[in-house]
Amino acid sequence: MWYGMLGHVNFASLKRLRNMRLISNVNIENCSKCPVCVEAKFGKKPFKSITTRKTKLLELMYSDLTDFKNIMSKGRKKWYITFVDDCSRCTKVYLLKSKDEAEEMFLMCKAEVKNQLDRKIKRLTSDKVANMIPIP
């Protein structure tokens, strides 16, 4: 329990906190590796470097829809969708209960940027879509 509450702190720090009597009821000897921490430390191949970016805001946005890998957020959300502007790299993240909410979140993002910047998103791309989609 303490391990999760302290943000997956290492076992040496848990021992130190226990020895300082700041936390109690900690049995570190029987602990095993946390699957979330093991997965987070997997090596990933680097992305290709980008040589050119769009020069105008909202000219191109990237989107990605991903799940939390069998973990739910405190608000019982299992998915998240991101929208990244190519020019500014500004990112918006929305939590979703199901994948069905993705279109609704895109419309919400589109309305938010229209209100904030008085500009429209021109093109949207995703890893699942081969070509960029022009936005009406």
Image (spheres, rainbow, N blue to C red):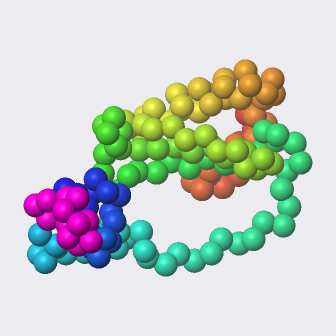
Q: Quadrant location of residue 133?
A: top right
Q: Which residues are magenta?
A: 15-26
> Residue at the location (28% across, 53% down)?
5
Q: Is 58 drawn above or below residue 47 in the view shown?
A: above
Instruction: Judge left or right: residue 87 versus residue 5.
Output: right
Along the viewing direction, whichever of 83 and 38 lies nearer the viewer: 38
Along the viewing direction, whichever of 133 and 85 lies nearer the viewer: 85
Instruction: Judge left or right: residue 47 versus residue 117.
Output: left
> Residue at the location (81% across, 23% down)?
118
Q: Position of residue 1 (x, y in %)?
A: 19, 56
Is residue 132 shown to the viewer in this render? no
Which quadrant would the C terminus be assigned to in this image?
Answer: top right
Q: Is residue 7 magenta?
A: no
> Residue at the location (51% across, 37% down)?
94
Q: Position of residue 128 (x, y in %)?
A: 57, 53
Q: Position of residue 78 (x, y in %)?
A: 35, 44
Q: Quadrant location of residue 123?
A: top right
Q: Is 6 drawn above or below residue 106 in the view shown?
A: below
Along the viewing direction, whichever of 74 and 130 lies nearer the viewer: 74
Q: Is residue 22 magenta?
A: yes
